[in-house]
Image: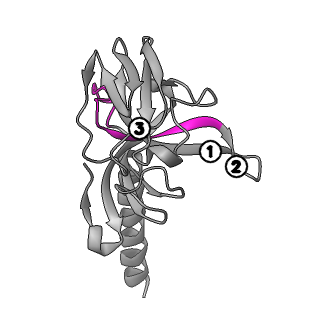
Amino acid sequence: MSKNLWVWVRDIAIAVAIAIIIMQFIKPTIVKEHSMEDTLHPNDYIFLSKQAYNLGGSPERGDIVVFHSELESDDGTTKNLIKRVIAVEGDTVGIHDGVVYVNNDPIDEPYIKDDYTDGQMPEITVPKGDLFLLGDNRQSSRDSRDPSVGFISKSKLIGKAIFRVFPFADFGPLK
């Protein structure tokens, strides 16, 4: 009997150790808002790479990231938001006539929901250590265009969205 108990304890300890190691690299997350439609929808279950930018990598234009914001939910807790990297430090970004320009070039955005970006924004330069982020559903997104969000410091990043687990019909890597 004690030999069987030892085998069970060992197997459980190994499983817990593996889970802890995996959780150092991957964070499961559920999408709550509509700001990334049609790429992501409310209740999509995704995995974040927590180490994507800690192992020498830097965020790149087009990455989908989750970050700590200063916005508060109804219960008073701060919100984590998910957005797409549009411009990185040193880039200039502007919005004119429904088109986003980075470094004076219009960017190709096949992922945005309504094929245009609301509002006008004069050219601004992304400060060192910061990112300019937008939601894919531009008409329903509080993002870097909004002064309450603004530029996002790389230090506020939680991780890079890399994989959708649920719904099963959309199972696979994120682009």
Q: Is residue 153 visible?
A: yes
Asked which secondary structure carries label 2, the reply is loop
Residue at the image point whose x is 33% and y is 15% from the top: 91
Which residue matches tag 1? 79
Residue 28 in percent (x, y) is at 43, 57
Asked whether 63 falls inside the magenta stretch, the response is: yes
Residue 115 in percent (x, y) is at 33, 46
Residue at the image point whose x is 43% and y is 49% from the top: 137
Q: Amino acid at mark 3?
A: Thr
Q: Amino acid at mark 1?
A: Lys
Which residue matches tag 2? 73
Q: Identify the mark at residue 55; answer none if there is no mark.
A: none
Q: Nearer the viewer, mark 3 or mark 1?
A: 3
Q: Quadrant of the N terminus?
A: bottom left
Say whether disc 3 or disc 1 marks the residue closer to the N-terminus. 1
Work out whether residue 162 or residue 27 is closer to the camera in this orientation and state it: 162
Residue 69 in percent (x, y) is at 59, 36
Q: Is residue 125 visible?
A: no
Give the answer, above or below, for where 13 lies relative to 127: below
Q: Main secondary structure of the magenta part?
A: loop
Asked whether 35 falls inside the magenta stretch, the response is: no
Q: Identify the mark at residue 117; answer none if there is no mark.
A: 3
Q: Residues within 10 Å of mark 1 (few under 14, many from 20)?
A: some
| Magenta residues, start to end | 52-70
Q: Residues within 10 Å of mark 2 (few under 14, many from 20)?
A: few
Gap between marks 2 and 3, in whole Å?
Answer: 25 Å
Asked which secondary structure carries label 1, the reply is strand
Asked which secondary structure carries label 3, the reply is loop
State the image quarter where residue 167 is shown.
bottom left
Work out whether residue 24 or residue 161 is closer to the camera in this orientation and state it: 161
The answer to whether marks 1 and 2 mark residues whose Cβ atoms lie closer than 8 Å is yes
Q: Is residue 161 left or right of residue 70?
A: left
